[in-house]
Image (tube, grey):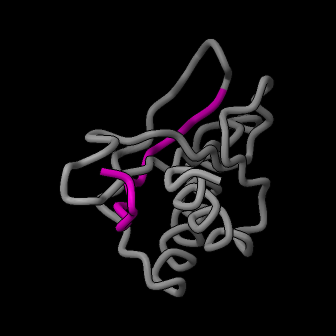
Amino acid sequence: MTALGDARSAVAAALAQVGVPVHPHPPQTLNAPCVVIVPGSPWIQPRGTVTLDLVAYANPAGGNTPAVTRLEDLIEAIRDGLWNAGLAPGDTDQPRSDNDAGVLYCTTPVTLRTTCH
């Protein structure tokens, strides 16, 4: 596996207890609730670090209020899982709506040390 793949695997392992599917790569079909791991920005830094974005998705079926509550629960589980694995999450952005996919989502970055230069 590559250094980037190792980083993605480490983050996925840290999220094993969030209670929803965690996709280490973007899935063909998005079924919320779930977490998708994607390259962050900056993705690879010259000091041997890589940033990955953890995108949490919630289904707004039943209305936006329960969807935001589900998203909040998921974000807390993501942040707890990262901290418990010794990975410090960055700032989580505000919930946004993707009307085409019919989901609410928000992103939390995490930066890891890697051998990738």
The residue stretch that appears in magenta: 103-117
Residue 36: % across, % down: 62, 44
Question: Is 112 one of the magenta-colored residues?
Answer: yes
Question: Which residue does the image show at 59% across and 68% down from the upper left?
Answer: 10
Residue 15: % across, % down: 65, 68
Q: Residue furthest left?
A: 47
Name the side, left or right, on which 72 lies relative to 93.
Answer: right
Rendered image quadrant of residue 63: top right
Question: Which residue does the image show at 50% across and 75% down from the upper left?
Answer: 82
Residue 100: % across, % down: 63, 12
Number of callouts: 0
Question: Is 26 one of the magenta-colored residues?
Answer: no
Q: Residue furthest top?
A: 100
Viewer-closest of 56 and 95: 56
Name the side, left or right, on which 90 lies relative to 32.
Answer: left
Question: Which residue does the image show at 58% across and 60% down from the upper left?
Answer: 6
The correct choice, above or below, for 75 with respect to 96 in the image is below
Examine the residues drawn in magenta and state their main secondary structure.
strand
Question: Which residue does the image show at 34% across and 41% down from the upper left?
Answer: 43
The correct choice, above or below, for 113 with respect to 3 in the image is below
Name the side, left or right, on which 11 lies relative to 17.
Answer: left
Viewer-closest of 43 and 46: 46
Name the side, left or right, on which 17 lies relative to 110.
Answer: right
Residue 12: % across, % down: 65, 62
Viewer-closest of 114 and 22: 114
